[in-house]
Image: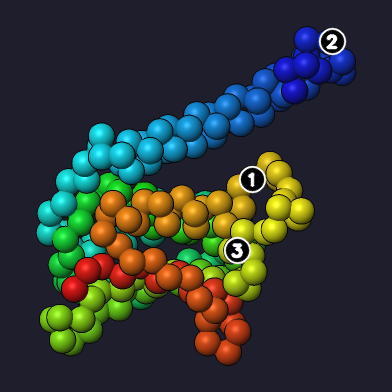
């Protein structure tokens, strides 16, 4: 886009401004992703320590829903939250867990999901682990890494990219992560499980 402007190939000053605005948005996205990857590498090597403390997971899910509703609406995806009224406490880092859930929702949107469900599963037995399930109506194959011969480089990141980032975050955060096909082949479920 900058090259078109520099070579004076734009039809009007309005088109030049539009290209500059698009390039600016793309650069902001690149910087955001670079910042995330830098923070993740620091987390993995122990230079950045998660701040673990008891937190009410229902409140976190409600906040994540508020932060992602507009993005889902813009992608024509309906986001449903189930179980957030529960007062279940987990031990974790609020900001990192928030980032993990937002990335999973962005992954579902990248997979082309039109219906997305965020569910808090808490069990009656105190020793059973708490789970958060992110279910989308797109097949499991959309989340898996394609073979090297099939790799493409689209403008947006794929669902598998987001899943790989979350998988790397899950280890230092003490989360178990599982990707599976939904019942009756009705899409994909990503399960985040907190330690019991």
Residue 156, numbered circle: 1
Label 3 neighbour load within 10 Å: few <14, some 14-19, many 20+: some
Q: What residue would you read off at disc 3?
A: 144
Q: Quadrant of residue 196?
A: bottom left
Q: How many marks?
A: 3
**For residue 57, which quarter of the picture?**
bottom left
Please tell me which of labels 2 and 3 falls first in the chain: 2
Residue found 31% across the figure and 70% down from its top: 193
Dot 3: element: loop
Q: Position of residue 134 (x, y in %)?
A: 44, 69
> Which mark is in front, 2 or 3?
3
What label does residue 91 carry, if any? none
Sequence-wise first label, 1 or 3:
3
Is the C-beta separation of discs 1 and 3 under 8 Å?
A: no
Residue 144 versus residue 161 in the image, above or below:
below
Q: Tell me the tag on residue 8.
A: 2
Q: Is residue 141 above or below residue 147?
A: below
Give the alpha-carbon distance from disc 2 to disc 1, as whole Å.
Answer: 28 Å
The image quadrant that residue 110 belongs to is bottom right
């Amino acid at each position: 886009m900058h090259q078109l402007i520099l070579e004076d190939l734009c039809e009007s000053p309005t088109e030049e401004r539009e290209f500059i605005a698009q390039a600016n948005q793309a650069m902001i996205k690149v910087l955001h992703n670079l910042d995330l990857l830098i923070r993740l590498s620091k987390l993995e090597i122990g230079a950045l320590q998660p701040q673990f403390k008891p937190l009410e997971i229902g409140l976190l899910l409600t906040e994540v829903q508020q932060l992602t509703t507009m993005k889902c609406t813009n992608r024509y995806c309906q986001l449903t939250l189930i179980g957030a009224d529960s007062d279940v406490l987990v031990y974790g880092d609020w900001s990192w867990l928030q980032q993990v859930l937002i990335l999973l929702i962005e992954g579902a949107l990248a997979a082309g999901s039109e219906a997305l469900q965020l569910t808090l599963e808490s069990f009656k037995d105190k020793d059973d682990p708490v789970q958060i399930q992110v279910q989308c109506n797109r097949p499991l194959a959309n989340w898996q890494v394609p073979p090297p011969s099939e790799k493409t480089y689209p403008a947006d990141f794929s669902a598998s990219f987001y899943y790989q980032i979350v998988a790397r975050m899950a280890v230092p955060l003490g989360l178990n992560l599982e990707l599976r096909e939904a019942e009756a082949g009705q899409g994909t479920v990503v399960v985040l499980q907190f330690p019991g």
